[in-house]
Image (cartoon, helix red, strand yellow):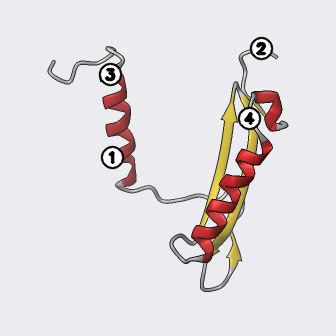
Amino acid sequence: MHSDAFRWQLCAPEEAGLSRSGLDAVRAMLDAEIHEGRIPGTITAVARRNRLVFLEAQGWRDPLSRHPLPTDGLFRMMSSTKSVTAVAVLAMQDEGRLDIED
């Protein structure tokens, strides 16, 4: 395996320079959002240095039937991709790799 290849197996956070307590805080914050009804569920993946250190599904695929959200669940992004693209374009402009005036 090439040393820069992404490793899909779950690694200890410390192997990638992250703390387990920090990831526990992310889990707790997302649990609170689900409990308060602000979001039905979430799939969270955290990777650093080509290592997957956190992959967890929390909450419900369907809140009414209480079907749990699986880690391989799919979402309809629809117009959500526009904001992601806008952030990417602005980041590239800040880095000097793109000039939106061209």
Q: Amino acid at mark 4?
A: Leu
- Residue carrying label 4: 18
Query: Could you tell which of marks 1 and 3 lies nearer the N-terminus?
Result: 1
| Mark 1 element type | helix
Q: Is residue 86 above or below residue 92?
A: below
How far apart are the two marked residues, 3 and 2, measured between alpha carbons?
30 Å
The numbered mark, 3 or 4, whose residue comes first in the sequence reads 4
Residue depicted at x 53% and y 70%: 39
- Per the image, label 2 sits on a secondary structure element best described as loop
- Res. 78 in view: yes
Name the residue beneath numbered marker 1.
82
Q: Amino acid at mark 1?
A: Lys
Q: Which mark is residue 51?
A: none
Instruction: Give the CA distance from mark 3 to mark 4.
Output: 27 Å
Asked if the residue at tag 3 contacts the one at tag 1, i.e. Cβ–Cβ closer than 8 Å, the answer is: no
Percent x, y of residue 42? 61, 61
- What number is the disc on residue 3? 2
* Location of residue 3 (image quadrant): top right
Q: How many marks?
A: 4
Where is residue 85 shown, x and y percent of the image? Answer: 36, 38
Front position in the image: 102 or 54:
54
Q: Which residue is mark 3?
A: 94
C-alpha gap between disc 2 and disc 1: 33 Å
Q: In this rendering, which labeled residue sits more in front, label 3 or label 2? A: 3
Disc with the residue nearer the chain's start (3 vs 2)? 2
Residue 72 appears in the figure = no
Residue at the far left in the pictured view: 101
45 is higher (above) or lower (below) than 78 = above
Q: Secondary structure at mark 3?
A: helix
Identified at 36% across, 17% down, the residue is 95
Few, some or many residues within 10 Å of mark 4 (<14, 14–19, 20+): some
